[in-house]
Each structure stands twice: as structure tokens, then as C-alpha cells.
Amino acid sequence: NAAASNTLTGNGGTFQFTGTSAVTLGATRLLTVGAAGVTLEADDAAGVLTIVSAGGTAGNLTKTGPGTVVLSGTTNLGTGAVTVTAGT
């Protein structure tokens, strides 16, 4: 379980990843998505963001930008849908 200080919570906003290499948000960094959803924008085609832990997701997760976002590990997206509009 992630501590509250390690939880990224979005509800209608955008998280932007501008990295040009691989970055992993480990198991202690939980991503939660509220009912209004969240956009993950990966700006650089060379960037790879791996999210190991997501849970409590009620809204939709939309991935934009040319970069790569990987959902792995103990990811539980609940009732929300995942949409990739650009990149992988």
C-alpha cells in the first residue's frame, strides 16, 4: 500500500511527462483517477513512463502525446476505460 504522500490523484486534470528516457513510478507511488478522469500526456517520443501501481480508478484514463506510457504491476483500473490517442 502506498502512503498518502506518495499518491498522485487526478480528477479532470492532466499529468504531463516531459522525460526523454525511461522513468518508473514504483509500487509506492499510487495513481488514482477520479470520476472526471485524467489525461497522461507523454511529450517526447523517446520518453517511457512506467506506472507500476494504480488503483481506486473511477474515471477514464486518456494517454496523449508521442511518448510511451506503460501500466504494469498491481495496476487496477477499476471501472474506468483507457484510451490511447497518440503514441503507445
Image: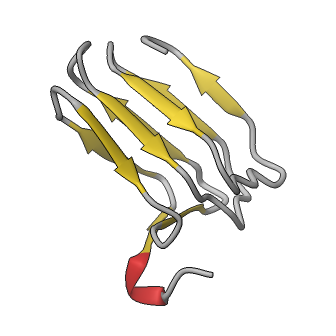
Q: Position of residue 44 (x, y in %)?
A: 20, 19
Q: Is residue 59 left or right of residue 7?
A: right
User: Front-most of 17 and 62?
Assistant: 17
Residue 70 percent location from the top left of the image? 52, 33
Residue in the image at 74% along x and 50% along y: 77
Question: Which residue is located at x 62 percent, y 58 percent?
Answer: 54
* Quadrant of the rendering where the N terminus is positioned: bottom right
Residue 26 in which image quadrant: bottom left
Locate residue 27, reporting x and y percent: 53, 65
| Left or right: 64, with 45 as reference point | right
Give percent across and percent down for residue 24.
37, 48
Total number of numbered discs in the rendering: 0
Q: Eyeballing the image, is 55 above or below 81? A: below
In the image, what residue occupies the spot 40% across and 78% down? 6
Residue that extends furthest to the bottom in the rendered view of this protein:
4
- Horizontal side of residue 77 vs 70, given as left or right: right
Above or below 72: residue 58: below
Going by the image, does 40 lie left or right of 47?
right
> Relative to 5, is 82 above or below?
above
Closest to the observer, 15 or 76: 76
Name which quarter of the figure residue 36 lies in. Answer: bottom right
